[in-house]
Each structure stands twice: as C-alpha cells, then as structure tokens.
Image (tube, coloured by chain):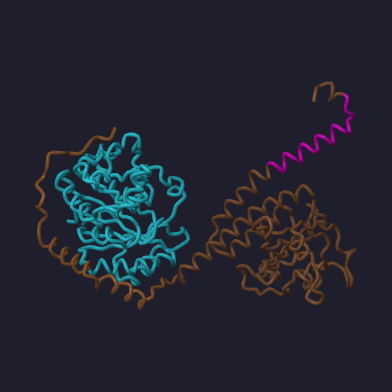
Chain colours: A cyan, B brown
Amino acid sequence: MPKIISIHSFRGGTGKSNMTANIASSLALHGKRVGIVDTDIQSPGIHVLFGMDEENMTRALNDYLWGECLIEDTAYIVTPPPVKEAGGTIYLIPSSIKPGEIARVLREGYDVARLIDGIRQLVDRLKLDYLLIDTHPGLNEETLLSITISDALVVILRPDNQDYQGTAVTVELARQLEVPKMFLLVNKVPAAFDREQVREKVAKTYNAQVAGVIQLTDEVVRLASGGVFCLLYPDHPVAKQIRGIADLIVA
Amino acid sequence: MTDTGIQSLADDELASLLRLLESEQARAHLLMNVVIPIGVALAYETEFDHLLERILIDAMNLCSADGGALYLRGDDDLLRPAILRIESLNLTCGGTSKTPLPAKIVPILNPKTDSDNQRSVAARAALLGLVVNLHDMSAMTGPDGIVAEAFQQQTGYHVCSVLALPLRASSTRIIGVVELVNACRPNGEISPFEPGMQQVVESLCLLASAALESYVRQQKLKDQVRDMRIQVDEAKKAKQVTAIVETEYFKALRDRARKLRTEKSTDDPPANSQGSENA
C-alpha cells in the first residue's frame, strides 16, 4: 500500500494543488491520517484551500530546511469538519508565504536531501497512513528526489500541447527511477470533450494508467481556490470521480 | 395617472390605451410562456437538423407565417439555405426531411459587382444585421427588384409579405438568417408582419442564435478531441531523458531509489510529537 504519493505536473496551472487537497481529503474521509507537504516553496498556495489563517502560520517548511526546527514542528492540523466527523486527520506542512523567506530560498537554495529526510521522518513521527507531496512544477532535483522516495506518482496534465512533451519526459524519468506505481490524471478537460476518448489517447500515448479525466465544471471554476471541492460538493460527479481516483492510487 | 386624468381622456384615447395595454400583455405572455421555454428547449437540442427545424417552425408558428427558410452563413460569405418550409404547399425541404433543397446559394456580396447584394432579402438582413420587414413584395418585382430566393423557385408560389431576421452570434457576427414569408390572418388572408410580433420573433432569434452558436462551439470541440493529437517528439524526448539519466547524479539517485524500495523505512524512530494545532 503506497504511503508516500507525489503529485506532480510538468507545467503550472494544471490544478495540482487543488487535486492534492482533494485526494488527501478523500483519503482522510476513510478515517486515515494524511499529511500534505507543500514543496512548492517558490509559490505556495495549498494552505488557502484548507482555510488556513496565514497570521497563525508561525512555522513553515522553510524553518525546517534552515535547520531551525524539527519537521514535525512545522505540521498544522487542518482537518476540515467532514473529515473530522469521519475520524480522519489532515496535517499540512506549509511553505512560508513570507516574501523574505521565498526570496531566501530563491537566493540561497536549500538542502534538498534534508527535505527528503524530513518527508520520510514525517510519516513515522506523525504516524501517517499517507503522505502527499505537492511538488513544484517542472523537472528539478527536488522533483526527482520526491519521485525517488515515493511509492506512487501522480502526474497531472491538461489536454494542451504545451503539456505533452514535458509530461512524456517526466513519465520516462519516473520509469527509470522505478517508481512502483504511476498514474496520469488529465485535468481541466473542456466539458464538450469525450472523457473516454481522452483517456484512451492519453493512456496509449504515454503507455501509462490514466487514473481519471476530470472535466472543467462551472462549480469547480467558481470555487477556484476557495475550498476543497470534494468536501463542499460531495455529491457532485467530479467529487465522486476524485474519490475513485484516490482509492485507485492507494489500492 | 390620477383618476381625474383618466376621466379627462376622450373615449377613443382610452380605448387606444387599453388596446396598447392588451397587446403589451399579450407580448409579455408570449415572451414568458412561449419564447423563453422555446429558447430553453433549443439549448438542449442535440441534433443539428432538429435544431434548425425547431428554430424555423417555432418562428413560423409565432407569427403565423405560411413559409419560412433558414440560411446559414459560411466563412465564404455565402448564405446557404439549410431548410425551407411552405405550409400551403405542404412542402418541406432540407432539415430532417430527405427532400433536397431547390433553393440556390445566396451571395451576401453581389459576385458581379463585388458590392452589397441588395436584391436578396436574406442577404440584406445579413449585410445590415437588421430585420427586414417588407409588407408587399409584389410592388418590388422586376429585373432590379427584391427577391426571396428560397421561395422564388416554387412555381406558383407568390411571396407577398417578408420578415427576414439575422441570427447574430455576437455584436458583429451574423451566422445566418431566418426568412419568414406571408403572414396569415385567421381567415387565411395574407397580411404584413406586425411590428409587435416582429419584436417577439426577434427575441426568439436571439435565443436561437445562442443555441446555434453553442451547438457549433461544442461540435468544434468534439471535432478537436476526435482529432486530438498528443504530439510527443520521441527523438527529442530520448535526447532530453538521456541528458538527465546519464548524469552521475541521476545514477546515484536511481541507486538510492532501489535501496530505499528494498528496505523498510525504519531509519527514524517514531517520535511523540503530533504537530502543532492550527488555530
């Protein structure tokens, strides 16, 4: 059963953070303890989806990376009420939203190996059932290391020419790193597209399992970064789809 | 208006006001109970020919027109008749019927002079983007007269009144024309298309245009996905992958991955900390 799951996309704007929050919530709804690490240090954002008050964010992943605290000291419990009722817990390890901290990362870089060690420690120290890594888009050292320590990788892409080539390289590198499970997730698919056709084409092109084809609905657009879609609209077909995807990933 | 004001009106003025009120009420009723439900139904129509047929039949029914044609505008600035109906001749061409359309293609520009085609009622509506309402075409025939092409080829069919309405996809783009001919009074007599009814049909055409445009957009997307080519340059991919996997760094990473996957992650003993509560 996969414990560490990286959610990645070659390009930005694929809805990666949204999908990470939704998959994490779907898993936690089964009464599981789920952690999310926002490693998108340069442009953090997933905390917004859990309604986290930035004023109360006293510690962030950055502090751990600079060696100023333990990794578990940066974890916040952000469990939304429906997940709490179901007996689940969600921990979020946010990246700092302070411009000075972001600038420092960009200027000085950080010890990626320390990040990876921290992620592995989190699983044990917080007794997590699953840990999701919301990665920074693109291919860099941090992404490759995230894939290395992951039991499963979800690569998100949109039906967009600009996503195809980079996704192909990412998929191939993940294969070379022998990630045990890999899924593609096609997101932001226009409503007029036939989902099955998209699924077939993507699966055939990348020779990989397509966990889901998510259409861009009005509700999803309206919500944007306002909350976790699966929890707000649990009966919506997209919410049901995402729950199915979450189950498939950890099966 | 005060009671004194009403009393001071002459009887005929009052009667005229009442007629106006009644006609406005009837128009509001038509818009609310006929036009809007038709617009909703059009939006859900999934068959193109059915959609065209419904637009035309509903427009004809609204103003009791004996005949009607729907033209679609191509990228080549030609109006192509898509469907034609004449009730008194029991004639239906195009649309879902198997009967071919006899009517010819109408250029919006006059091909000989490259100037506006002012002879055709439909072309004029498309050109100007305005409704053309002619009470009696009989007076306008002749070599330079005005024609309603779709009906002209029906031997013995005489077009008297015409109402041509542009189908507008946006403020500037006309995607077609609905041409209605020969409004009929209940006694069968041909009459002009009344301005009040014209407004109602205009509203219907607005909704019809939106439904058509939405249908076309959806079709385009469907066509795109049918032709959706996921282009991956394999040679380029191999080059990009090789450039990464042949580095010492990547090789070390792969070794590390293998090692990690074979061993259980028991390096770090569990700690008591459960993280800090987020207020």
Which picture quadrant has residue A171? bottom left
Q: Residue at x 76, y 61 (%)?
A: B125
Residue B176: which quarter of the image? bottom right
- In the figure, residue B2 lies in which quadrant? top right
**B22 in the magenta segment:** yes
Residue for point 80% across, 25% down: B1
Q: Is residue A34 magenta?
A: no
Measured along the vertical axis of the image, is residue A182 above or below residue B206? below
- x then y, percent, for residue A11: 38, 60
- Residue A84 percent across, percent down from the top left: 25, 37
User: In which quadrant is the C terminus of chain B drawn?
Assistant: top left
Along the line of sight, the residue nearer the viewer: B178 or A182: A182
The range drawn in magenta is B8-28
In this image, B136 relative to A143: left or right?
Answer: right
Numbered marks: total: 0
* Extreme-front residue of the structure: A108
